[in-house]
Image: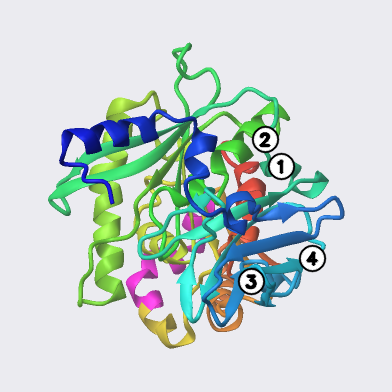
Amino acid sequence: MLNFRSAAGLIALASILSLPAAAQRQARTPTPNDTLKSPEVLPDRQVTFRIYAPKASEVAITGDWITHGRAKAGPLEKADDGVWSITLGPFVPDFYSYSFSVDGVRTLDPKNAWVKPGVTSLSNMFEVPGDDAAYEETRPVPHGEVRIVWYQSSTLDTMRSMHVYTPPGYESGNAKYPVFYLLHGAGDDDSGWSTIGRAGFILDNLLAEKKAKPMIVVMPNGSMPPSDKGPAFQAGRFADELLKNVIPYVEKNYRVIANRDNRAIAGLSMGGAQTLRVLPSNLDKFAYAGVWSMGVGRESTAGFEQDNAAFLDNASKTNKELKVFWLAVGENDALVGESAKNLDQLLTAKGIQHEFHVTEGGHTWINWRHYLHDYAQLLFR
């Protein structure tokens, strides 16, 4: 054994490190993991997933495609060399997320560096290219910028981050733009819409096709610090954060048109609940709103009506001020019946003009990217 504390040992170590990478690899026993590829998207749009786990007794995969019926998931098969694999699909062209379970422990694919971050967990991502995914792909069109912006939150007494998309030409021009506040769901942070959500690329492609108005998109961190005071308290904290910190920061530091006709808001799941918390009492600030994969639970209807009477019971005023109110949910979403449809029925009964769309699939980013694509085309017209 080399003693790297001695002069001779240090010389020996230096000689090893100076070897080419290939020679260094020869100093250990090669394994199948050295050349493993995962995931591998095949020409027929099937996808093979692999992981080297020679000591594991069970490996499985799960992904966000399941509730869409686009492919199955399940156990991987182990080869004699310790590589577990499964081939699924063919997949509809799209972006997907997945993770492995190795002997019951949720695990990332170590061969895939494309990772979707979250508040408490991570997932891998992969792309199946094709025409159906063209609206969200990285295409050769003018691209805007997505920046991570840090600011001091007076509501939470801490530094917070948000992601901000500026359209192509923002840096070289002096024009002012409308602003769209885009909210993520529980378990994610402000990076969600810029990673698996593909928001910047979706806007770039819409602008290139002249299907949307140039806009700034602000993606704040809607995940509040832990509290035992319940969802209503957390929703109130976020409302304060948005109205007292995020919007003032944006309007001070970006070239925006700071009036209600040029502000939009939308959110998915938890972000949809936050939209419903902010919107009814702030029609002086927002003229466009979207609620995706969220609604009002039947047991909460009476309380929602009481808290938002001015919004619900004065339909003529609300309809005049709210230019677009766009609701969407997947047919396999757990919130479709008792929450989203209930909100649709309540708004209809109150005479509040809105659109309600029930799409395929479930509570996944597969839907939310489509919702963003459709909703953004309606803004600031």
Residue at (58% x, 26% y) in the render: 143
Question: Which numbered disc, 1 or 3, marks the residue that appears first in the sequence?
Answer: 1
The Cα atoms of the two marked residues, 1 and 2, are separated by 8 Å
Q: Which circle, 1 or 2, is nearer the viewer?
A: 1
Residue depth check, mark 3 versus mark 4: number of the one nearer the observer: 4
In the rendering, at what x and y percent does residue 293 appear? 55, 68
Measured Cα–Cα span from mark 1 to mark 3: 20 Å
Which residue is denoted by mark 3 in the rendering? 362
Q: Can residue 166 be seen in this view?
A: yes
How many residues crowd around disc 2 within 10 Å: few (fewer than 14), some, or many (20 or more)? many
Question: Mark 1 touching mark 2, by CB under 8 A?
Answer: yes
Residue at figure coordinates x 61%, y 68% from the top left: 63
Residue marked by disc 4: 89
Query: Does residue 233 appear left or right of residue 326 in this picture?
Result: left
In the image, which residues are magenta?
Answer: 304-321
Residue bearing mark 2: 206
x and y percent of residue 315 in the render?
Answer: 51, 63
Name the disc covering residue 135, or none. Answer: 1
Residue farthest along the bottom direction in this orientation: 299
